Image (spheres, helix red, strand yellow):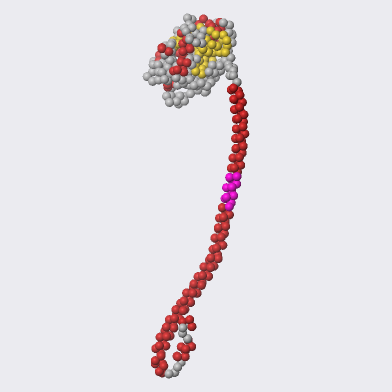
């Protein structure tokens, strides 16, 4: 091959010279040259084979490349399409969100306009002089019976001023067709007022007085003291009860009085005056202890609240039962207790302490039955039997309670 600098025709010529001299002197060199030539030819053959293999590899690589490139392009284009679809969905969702927010803004703008209009109306209304629409009767007296004696015939709100009172105060007077005027000191009917109050609240009174006698309240121990302790005529306490089945009963206590705050508004009465509800104020034998009746009676007991414990118990009855009342250890009557819808309740319902804390009168219903409605009201003894011996029961039967 000329590429290696050797002329093959010359080599053949030398080999064919029939001269011994030349054979002797040139044969070894020729052999060497031939060996070198063979070596070079083998090298060329090896290089040629390597080149062929390289070419084959390149062709195979090209074929693979030609086959793979479309796959990569397809995958890339597919991925791009998926991204585009995802972006389009995101855009659609955001457009919907923008639309919803625009609607919400429009709705809020309308509401703001309405509220502004309402605010203007309220401002105009409040700028006008306040008008008290609660009807308070004009007749006054020392108590409701005194008011009835002066000719009042309508039940409602009146101002009274007992003998030793520094100023008059508002009460609800229940005046019947016999001319009897009951001063109402307590009312329970729907559980709308929480009776778990402190000493000061029970002293001054709480709740709401209404002309129609349709609200709950406690008149106040100080006012009850003034109404009962300064009169020369014995006072009767009438207790009226209604259960969840609509049944009604009552109990009367003669010579009812409430002591001053210095004596912790102590409850005293002369005797049970009658009624069909039974004498729960005298205590009750629950069967838990031989002394049950003695330790659950109420005559002579001082008033207790969760912040002023005046009971006969080592613990605090008012705190345990969530009320203010004339507690002993603790009670057989409890008209300021927790209001339970439906009446019946359990130790679990009673909460942390588990004691009978409902509105109870155990000589009628047991201690795990909470009454629906109660009324405590007072009247002079001289008027309690007006209209006949059973007038009290008849009068109660006619109440809208």
Note whether residue 363 is visible: no
Residue 400 position (above or below residue 388): below
195 vs 390, nearest the viewer = 195
Query: Image point 47% across, 4% down: which residue?
Result: 232
Residue 278 position (above or below residue 89): above
314 vs 56, nearest the viewer = 56
Residue 325 position by quadrant = top left
Tell me, yes or no, whether the highlighted magenta stretch contains residue 146: no
Residue 353 in percent (x, y) is at 42, 24
Query: Image point 49% across, 18% down: which residue?
Result: 206
Residue 86 in percent (x, y) is at 57, 50
> Which image quadrant: the C terminus?
top right
344 vs 231, nearest the viewer = 231
Type of secondary structure dominating the magenta stretch: helix
In magenta, the rendered stretch is 84-95
Query: Image point 48% across, 23% down: which residue?
Result: 345
Tell me, yes or no, whether the highlighted magenta stretch contains residue 93: yes
Residue 334 in percent (x, y) is at 46, 17
Residue 136 in percent (x, y) is at 57, 13
Note whether residue 112 is visible: yes
């Amino acid at each position: 091959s000329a590429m290696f600098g050797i002329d093959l025709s010359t080599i053949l010529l030398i080999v064919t010279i029939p001269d011994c001299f030349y054979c002797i002197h040139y044969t070894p060199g020729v052999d060497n040259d031939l060996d070198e030539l063979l070596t070079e030819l083998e090298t060329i053959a090896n290089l040629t084979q390597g080149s062929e293999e390289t070419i084959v590899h390149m062709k195979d690589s090209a074929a693979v490349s030609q086959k793979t490139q479309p796959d990569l392009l397809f995958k890339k284009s597919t991925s791009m399409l998926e991204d585009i679809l995802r972006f389009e969905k995101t855009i659609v969702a955001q457009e919907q969100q923008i639309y919803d927010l625009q609607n919400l803004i429009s709705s809020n703008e309308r509401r703001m306009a309405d509220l502004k209009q309402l605010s203007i109306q309220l401002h105009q209304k409040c700028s006008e002089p306040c008008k008290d629409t609660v009807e308070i009767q004009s007749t006054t007296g020392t108590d409701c019976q005194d008011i009835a004696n002066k000719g009042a015939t309508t039940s409602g709100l009146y101002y009274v001023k007992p003998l030793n009172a520094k100023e008059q105060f508002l009460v609800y007077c229940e005046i019947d067709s016999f001319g009897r005027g009951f001063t109402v000191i307590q009312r329970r009917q729907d559980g709308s007022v929480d009776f778990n109050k402190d000493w000061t609240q029970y002293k001054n009174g709480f709740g709401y007085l209404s002309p129609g006698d349709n609200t709950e309240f406690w008149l106040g121990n100080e006012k009850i003291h003034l109404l009962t302790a300064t009169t020369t005529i014995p006072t009767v306490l009438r207790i009226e009860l209604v259960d969840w089945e609509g049944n009604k009963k009552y109990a009367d206590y003669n010579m009812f009085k409430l002591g001053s705050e210095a004596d912790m508004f102590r409850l005293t009465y002369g005797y049970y005056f009658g009624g069909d509800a039974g004498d729960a104020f005298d205590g009750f034998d629950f069967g838990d202890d031989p002394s049950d009746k003695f330790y659950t009676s109420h005559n002579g007991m001082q008033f207790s609240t969760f912040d002023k414990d005046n009971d006969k118990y080592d613990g605090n009855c008012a705190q345990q039962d969530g009320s203010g009342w004339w507690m002993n250890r603790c009670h057989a009557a409890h008209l300021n207790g927790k209001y339970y819808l439906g009446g019946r309740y359990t130790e679990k319902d009673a909460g942390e302490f588990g004691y009978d804390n409902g509105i109870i009168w155990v000589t009628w219903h047991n201690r795990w039955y909470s009454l629906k409605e109660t009324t405590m009201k007072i009247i002079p003894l001289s008027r309690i039997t007006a209209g006949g011996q059973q007038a009290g029961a008849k009068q109660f039967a006619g109440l809208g309670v």
